[in-house]
Image (cartoon, rainbow, N blue to C red):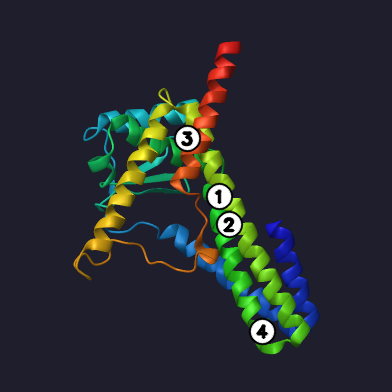
Amino acid sequence: MLYFILALEVILVLKALGDIGLIMALSAMSTLALLYVWATRHKFGENLIPLEREEIPWLYDGIAELAKKARVQMPRVYLCDDYIPNAYSFGNTIVLSLGLFEVLDEDEIIAVAAHELGHIKNRDTKWFPLVTYGRFLMLITTLILLIAGNAAVKVAALTLYIAYELARSDFMKKREFLADETALRLLTIPMSLKRALEELKYYEDLRMNVRVNAVPSIEPGIEREKRFAFFTETHPSYEERILRITFEMNNLMRIKQVQ
């Protein structure tokens, strides 16, 4: 669906602006391609610490075992010097914040790593950047069409951009659920993923409550910037993930009983 919308956008640019539109579209795509190459080669920040087995053997060995079960290469693992619990993945790399170690136990941290490994196994770390840069391309071409196009073209451009945003949000949410399902099949203790999400949800709710009741600006930067959810909501809620994990665990138990 995303590729179909992008194709329609390119056709609209060509129809509305002709050769000039083609040059603009190619220039935008070339620029984004260069930015993608640069970003993938300059991903590391100063606050990322390579995980050494000697320092945290249970974590290193746990991720190695997960990678073996998933039949993927052992990922590079980094610790992020950030007290807010967080985890993400890119390429063949998993990043875990030090804040996770404050609120989760060992099994739960392994479960979080399993979710990120699920993204790697399912090739989401390759798809997500393409989807994001496709969004940038849609934004650039839509702005061009809003400036240079007639009324019909402007309406079509806005419609395609909204359609892309909706499709992008739906796609990325589904991939989050799929990463959870993959993690459940990799983990020795599947329940640990559910417990980890419950703990993170509790921490997030507590943090939000503290922020609401605290003196303004007493804790700057702890909350992520809030924007219009229509354009940024690409992750399912903790409640949605916990509910789906519960259903998936019940299904796995039924399958084991039948076997």
Mark pair 4, 1: CA separation: 29 Å
Quadrant in the rendering for residue 129: bottom right
Mark in the foreground, 1 or 3: 1
Residue type highlighted by circle 1? Lys
Residue type highlighted by circle 2? Ser
Mark in the foreground, 2 or 3: 2
Mark in the foreground, 4 or 1: 1
**Label of residue 173 in the image:** 1
Q: SS class of the residue under badge 1? A: helix
Query: Toward the viewer: 44 or 248?
Result: 248
The answer to whether mark 2 and mark 4 are in CB contact below 8 A is no
Q: Earlier in the sequence, mark 3 or mark 4?
A: 3
Please indicate whether residue 251 sits to the left or right of residue 2 in the image: left
Q: SS class of the residue under badge 2? A: helix
Instruction: Residue lying at the far front in this picture: please name it.
Output: 213
- Residue 199 lies, with reference to residue 212, above or below; the image says above
Mark pair 2, 3: CA separation: 29 Å
